[in-house]
């Protein structure tokens, strides 16, 4: 029985002698560089945090710039009243009146698709108003 225990000990040790510990068996990977594990993980965590913040900020900016719906008011009633007054006073002629109305039409058509256009009379405050 003692012989079988001794033989098992020799097989497990792998060093050839009973009770001898193989070289390098007690060392771990962290034993050689104990202070380097925490800074490496800290740098990785900060890198991941920075990339996450940058990508989140970029997504918010792109959404706000190109996809978020905005309300824009066009003061058509005020524009027509001003053009009528100028025409009645003789300060503009028919051609100039047509050009001014076409400029209003171009201003309305140039509004991006993510902006909702409403009449300027319906707006109380806090809306961008386009005056051609």
Image: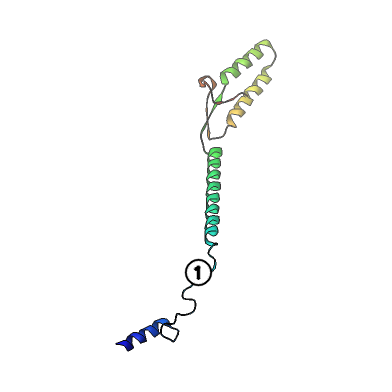
Q: Residue at x 61, y 25 (%)?
A: 104
Quarter of the rendering occupied by the C terminus:
top right
Q: How is the image coloured?
A: rainbow
Q: Position of residue 79 (x, y in %)?
A: 60, 19
Q: Would you place residue 60 above or below residue 93 in this image?
A: below
Direction from residue 127 to residue 96 in the image, left or right: right
Direction from residue 39 to residue 86 in the image, left or right: right
Local secondary structure at mark 1: helix
Q: Residue at x 33, y 89 (%)?
A: 3
Q: Would you place residue 100 above or below residue 38 in this image?
A: above
Question: Is disc 1 surrounded by few (<14), some (14 to 19) or many (20+) residues within 10 Å?
Answer: few
Residue lying furthest right: 91
Residue lying furthest top: 89
Q: Position of residue 15 (x, y in %)?
A: 45, 84
Q: Nearer the viewer, residue 29 or 19?
A: 19
Q: Position of residue 89 (x, y in %)?
A: 67, 10
Q: Nearer the viewer, residue 116 or 38?
A: 38
Q: Nearer the viewer, residue 92 or 128?
A: 128
The residue that disc 1 covers is 29
Residue lying furthest bottom: 3
Query: Number of marks in the image?
Result: 1
Quarter of the rendering occupied by the N terminus:
bottom left
Q: Position of residue 38 (x, y in %)?
A: 52, 59
Q: Would you place residue 120 above or below residue 1 in this image?
A: above
Q: Nearer the viewer, residue 119 or 49?
A: 49
């Amino acid at each position: 029985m003692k012989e079988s225990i001794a033989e098992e000990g020799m097989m497990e040790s792998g060093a050839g002698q009973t009770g001898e510990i193989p070289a390098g068996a007690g060392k771990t990977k962290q034993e050689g560089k104990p202070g380097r594990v925490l800074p490496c993980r800290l740098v990785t965590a900060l890198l991941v945090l920075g990339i996450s913040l940058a990508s989140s900020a970029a997504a918010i900016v792109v959404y706000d710039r190109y996809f978020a719906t905005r309300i824009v008011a066009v003061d058509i009633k005020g524009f027509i009243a001003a053009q009528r007054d100028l025409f009645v006073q003789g300060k503009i002629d028919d051609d100039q009146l047509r050009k001014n109305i076409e400029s209003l039409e171009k201003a309305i058509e140039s509004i991006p698709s993510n902006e909702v256009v409403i009449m300027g009379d319906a707006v109380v405050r806090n809306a961008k108003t386009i005056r051609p």
